[in-house]
Image (cartoon, coloured by chain):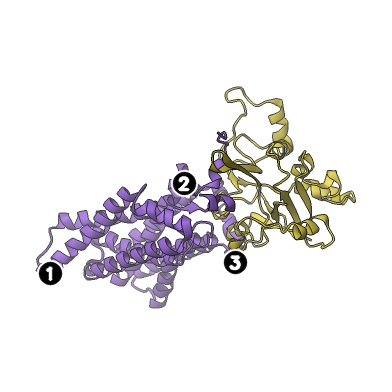
């Protein structure tokens, strides 16, 4: 089993709902986004093309971050999800430096969303429900809590909403697909095959689990 | 015009900042002092100078190790490196083992040597770990394949020469290994040669990111630091002093020798700074790479 995500770039409307929902779901502090949208433009007026790529942790099969972590805090599960155990992270940031996709963030200090105004009720609740340890590194975990809880309830990630990452279910353009890449009959496997989807920087030989399709 | 968004910079070459900006300067200094200390110990041990070995041990363990701990987000958890199996894949974990073994064996050797009964075998093993402590940073950085400037085994060779060359400098400064004087020109020549090979290799084989990184070091952003401190003060000046002394056979005034050694050590630090500062990631988006 290998959980994987496909983004159809033709469908993405750059609405940032995936980024916002991820921040809300995981109560991410200011300045931290596990998902990002990279926007740029190419060409000259009037033939300008806007490029937007939603990016997140690629949950690589040959993950550099897992390889370099000196404390064993970054681990790869059997289902392919790469996650960080915050209780083991020593904050050396070697993984942040080693990730060629720059998908990791170091949590340097506690910040308020409204500086000088104190924490809002939402932030206080978030700290209790999803505590982020200062002095450690964080990144996208494919909403593994949702996946694990969903599987326990007999749900199928990628098919049932309650067991699927929030960035996938919140996308209004249905540009994101999630599923088991090792199952040849799964929707994502078929889409990767049919659309000839490709990951970012395959030359690094990290074998990412996030694919991008342009048709 | 498209509004600039927070992560738009990632479509261009992005500088590595974690290990050089803000508290990241501690990493730069920590690695430099660990290598300098281990190099000092190594050079002093060949001269049988206990005071030189002690100086190297203190520079490596107290200054280098202390700076490393200060940098960690969770310094009290550093023992987890030794408790985990991270050493199987992580050069940072292996490096900690090398440094710990070097410090422990070095302390035992110095204690025994003070009593007059230190076995040669112990010195050999300690020096092996001191050498590994010098070169491990090269492997820590060369495994980062997202940064072309670092992704080469030549970096380990460069740091090996830098560490030993710096160690020789500290010993000369302290007067603990005067015999090293005869070797200085050889160290200097090999250092300059490897530095040149390293920069040329990255420039022509490191892709666009490597090319831009080397340009930043030798021609644009960090070139004043590189040419004035690393090359002029760190290589040309000590080299000129050494050659003048060798050709004329006259004694060089002590003050000038001290200035040249200080220049050498500053050049070492400046080069390490340039290598950390000019490290660039390739753009995350491949399409933009082609467009740019």
The residue drawn where x is 77% and y is 49% is: A177
Visible residue check, residue A107: no
**Where does the image place residue B113, in percent across and percent down from the top left?**
35, 70
Chain under callout 3: B
N-term mark: 3 or 1: 3
Element type where label 2 sits in the image: helix
Tell me whether the residue at label 3 lies in contact with that at label 2, contact meaning CB atoms closer than 8 angstroms: no
Give residue B88's mark: 3
Q: Spatial distance from mark 3 to mark 1, Cα to Cα?
A: 50 Å
In the foreground, B146 or B39: B146
- Quarter occupied by residue B59: bottom left
The residue sitting at the top extreme is A117
Q: Which chain is yellow?
A: A
- The circle drawn on residue B289 is none
Q: Nearer the viewer, mark 3 or mark 2?
A: 2
Distance Cα–Cα, label 1 vs label 2:
44 Å
Q: Pointer 3: residues within 10 angstroms few (<14), some, or many (20+)? A: few
Q: Which mark is residue B24?
A: 2
Tell me, yes or no, whether the two marked residues, 1 and 2, touch with CB atoms within 8 Å. no
**Image coords of residue B278 (percent x, y):** 42, 51
Residue under mark 1: which chain is it in?
A: B
Pair 3/1: label in front: 1
Work out whether B184 lies above or below A15.
Answer: below
Residue A185 seen in this snapshot:
yes
Which residue is pictured at 14% across the width and 65% down the height? B245
Quarter of the N terminus of chain B within the rendering: top right
- The chain to which mark 2 is attached is B
């Amino acid at each position: 089993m290998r959980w994987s995500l496909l983004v159809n770039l033709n469908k993405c409307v750059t609405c940032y709902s995936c980024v916002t929902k991820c921040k809300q779901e995981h109560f991410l502090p200011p300045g931290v986004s596990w998902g990002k949208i990279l926007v740029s433009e190419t060409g000259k007026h009037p033939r300008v093309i806007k490029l937007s790529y939603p990016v997140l942790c690629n949950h690589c099969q040959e993950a550099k971050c897992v390889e370099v972590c000196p404390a064993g805090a970054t681990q790869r599960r059997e289902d392919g999800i790469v996650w960080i155990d915050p209780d083991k992270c020593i904050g050396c940031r070697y993984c942040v430096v080693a990730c060629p996709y720059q998908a990791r963030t170091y949590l340097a200090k506690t910040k308020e969303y409204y500086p000088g105004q104190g924490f809002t009720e939402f932030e206080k609740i978030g700290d209790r429900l999803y505590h982020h340890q200062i002095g450690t590194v964080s990144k996208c975990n494919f909403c593994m809590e949702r996946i694990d809880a969903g599987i326990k309830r007999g749900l199928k990630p990628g098919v049932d909403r309650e067991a699927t990452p929030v960035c996938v279910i919140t996308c209004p353009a249905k540009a994101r697909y999630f599923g088991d890449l090792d199952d040849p009959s799964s929707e994502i496997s078929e889409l990767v095959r049919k659309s000839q989807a490709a990951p970012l920087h395959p030359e690094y030989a990290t074998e990412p689990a996030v694919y991008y399709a342009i048709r | 015009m498209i509004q600039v968004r927070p992560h738009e910079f990632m479509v261009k070459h992005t500088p590595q900042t974690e290990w050089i900006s803000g508290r990241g300067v501690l990493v730069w200094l920590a690695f430099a002092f660990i290598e300098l200390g281990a190099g000092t110990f190594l050079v002093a041990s060949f001269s049988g100078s206990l005071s030189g070995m002690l100086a190297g041990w203190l520079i490596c363990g107290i200054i280098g190790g202390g700076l490393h701990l200060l940098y960690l987000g969770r310094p009290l958890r550093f023992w987890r490196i030794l408790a985990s199996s991270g050493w199987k894949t992580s050069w940072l974990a292996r490096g900690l083992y090398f440094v710990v073994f070097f410090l422990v064996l070095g302390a035992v050797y110095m204690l025994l040597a003070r009593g007059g009964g230190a076995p040669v075998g112990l010195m050999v093993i300690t020096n092996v770990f001191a050498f590994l402590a010098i070169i491990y940073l090269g492997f820590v950085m060369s495994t980062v394949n997202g940064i072309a400037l670092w992704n080469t085994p030549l970096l380990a060779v460069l740091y090996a020469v830098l560490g030993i060359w710096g160690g020789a400098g500290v010993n000369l400064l302290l007067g603990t290994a005067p015999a090293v004087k005869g070797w200085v020109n050889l160290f200097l020549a090999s250092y300059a040669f490897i530095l040149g090979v390293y920069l040329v290799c990255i420039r022509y084989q490191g892709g666009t990111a490597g090319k831009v990184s080397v340009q930043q070091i030798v021609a644009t952003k960090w070139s004043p630091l590189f040419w004035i401190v690393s090359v002029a003060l760190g290589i040309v000046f000590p080299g000129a002093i050494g050659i003048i002394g060798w050709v004329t056979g006259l004694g060089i005034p002590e003050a000038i020798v001290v200035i040249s050694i200080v220049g050498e050590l500053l050049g070492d630090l400046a080069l390490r700074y340039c290598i950390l500062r000019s490290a660039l990631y390739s753009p995350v988006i491949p399409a933009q790479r082609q467009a740019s």
